[in-house]
Image (cartoon, rainbow, N blue to C red):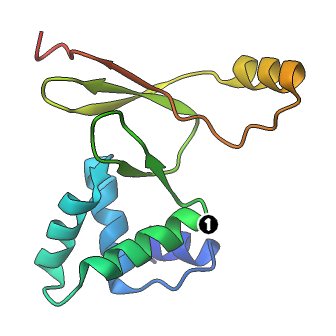
Amino acid sequence: MNTYTETLRQYNLKATPQRLAILQIINKHGHINIDTLYNEVKDQFNSISLATVYKNITSMTAVKLLIEVKLANAKSVYEIIKEDHAHLKCEICTNIEDFTIDTNNLFDNTSNLHSFRINYVNITLNGICKNCQ
């Protein structure tokens, strides 16, 4: 059975062909903005609307299957939620890479000092990648 089908069912979402395509495209890119996603989904489902793509993204984000990564001076991108990590964004080519980060100390210190419950961390470091230097 398709792993995306199983994943959607685990999140109590119907495994529609459009949702399966959205997950496959996001997984292929790692991080993708809504316009690029829509254009690629439209290649597979020529009658799909942008509103339908937004609706699916919203429902998958609501159940914490996807996460919106907000970027300074750029459109948000979406990714499939995985282990805690941060992002490296190149200011020239705009490529986004994940890097692993241990957030345990950050969570513990913040929670202890400020009595604040953290649900997730979204850290983006901006700079110039190796290829663009």
Mark 1, residues whose alpha carbon is within 10 Å: few (<14), some, or many (≥20)? few
Residue position marked by numbered label 1 in the rendering: 63
- Residue 122 in the image: state x and y as whole percent: 53, 35
What amino acid is at disc 1?
A: Val
Whether residue 93 appears in this view of the structure is yes
In the image, farthest residue toward the bottom: 47
Whether residue 2 appears in this view of the structure is no
Residue 92 is drawn in which quadrant?
Answer: top left
- Residue 100 in the image: state x and y as whole percent: 50, 25
Q: Residue at 52% x, 63% y: name it.
A: 61
Dot 1 falls on a residue whose secondary structure is loop
Q: Residue at 32% x, 30% y: name it.
A: 97
| Residue 63 as seen in the image, left or right of residue 16 | right
- Residue 46 in the image: state x and y as whole percent: 13, 86
| Residue 85 as seen in the image, left or right of residue 79 | right
Q: Is residue 38 above or below residue 115?
A: below
| Residue 75 as seen in the image, left or right of residue 5 | left
Q: Residue at 57% x, 39% y: name it.
A: 83
Residue 87 is drawn in which quadrant?
Answer: top left
Residue 116 is drawn in which quadrant?
Answer: top right
- Residue 35 in the image: state x and y as whole percent: 21, 61
Q: Residue at 18% x, 13% y: name it.
A: 130
